[in-house]
Amino acid sequence: MVRLFTGQLMPNFSFRTPFKNDLSFYDEVEGKKTAILFHRFIGCRLSQFDIRNLIQAYDQIAASGTNVFVVVQSPPETVRGYYAESSLPIIIICDPEQLLYKQFEIPVAASVEELKGGNFNKKMEEIEKKILSKAILKGNHYNYLR
């Protein structure tokens, strides 16, 4: 297990996306600054909201020379039900076994309230305005339980 902090070099790992298998993190990073975000499952409306915002901000992110990877607990076939390959400028890593969550010691929310975080109500208001897909409850509902 490896707990990382900002600025540390992330160890290489293999992963799959909704559209490709057996990719190397280092090969995909191509030496650029990289943000890797761990979310819940793709059916989670909060995860959808954050991914949508990343996609909308992608041009600005790319202009800074930064890659974006989002790890979700969903299998590739589920993610393909939400996104076409051509609609994703970011890389979504499918980790239904939650191996990366365990490898990088992603913390567990102690309660549903902690899981929601401080901006939950504001995000939910935005989600309702944008009418994002209703949650398909597949994945670990309490985030990253050990």
Image (cartoon, helix red, strand yellow):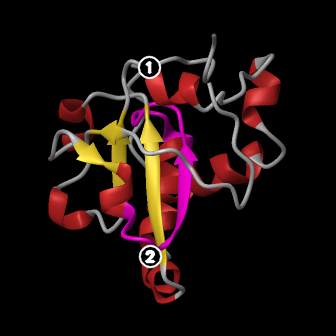
Residue 73 at x, y percent in the picture: 42, 28
> Residue, x 24% and y 46% (percent of image)?
23
**Residue density around tag 2, few if under 14, some if 14–19, many if 20 or more, within 10 Å:** some
Q: Which quadrant of the rendered structure holds the C terminus?
A: top right
Is residue 135 found left or right of 20 in the rendered image? right
Q: Which residue is mark 1?
A: 139
Residue 131 visible here: no
How far apart are the alpha carbons under marks 1 and 2? Answer: 26 Å
Residue 80 visible here: yes
Along the line of sight, which residue is nearer the eye, 58 or 95? 95
Q: Is residue 30 magenta?
A: yes
Q: Is residue 99 above or below residue 85?
A: above
Q: Is residue 88 above or below residue 146?
A: below
Q: Is residue 73 above or below residue 20?
A: above
Amino acid residing under circle 2: Tyr
Is residue 70 found left or right of 110 in the rendered image? left
Q: Which quadrant of the rendered structure holds the N terminus?
A: top right
Residue 25 at x, y percent in the picture: 37, 51
Is residue 65 found left or right of 74 in the rendered image? right
Q: Which residue is mark 2?
A: 58
Is residue 59 found left or right of 39 in the rendered image? left
Residue 34 at x, y percent in the picture: 52, 65
> Residue, x 75% and y 23% (percent of image)?
109
Amino acid residing under circle 1: Gly
Along the line of sight, which residue is nearer the eye, 16 or 57? 16
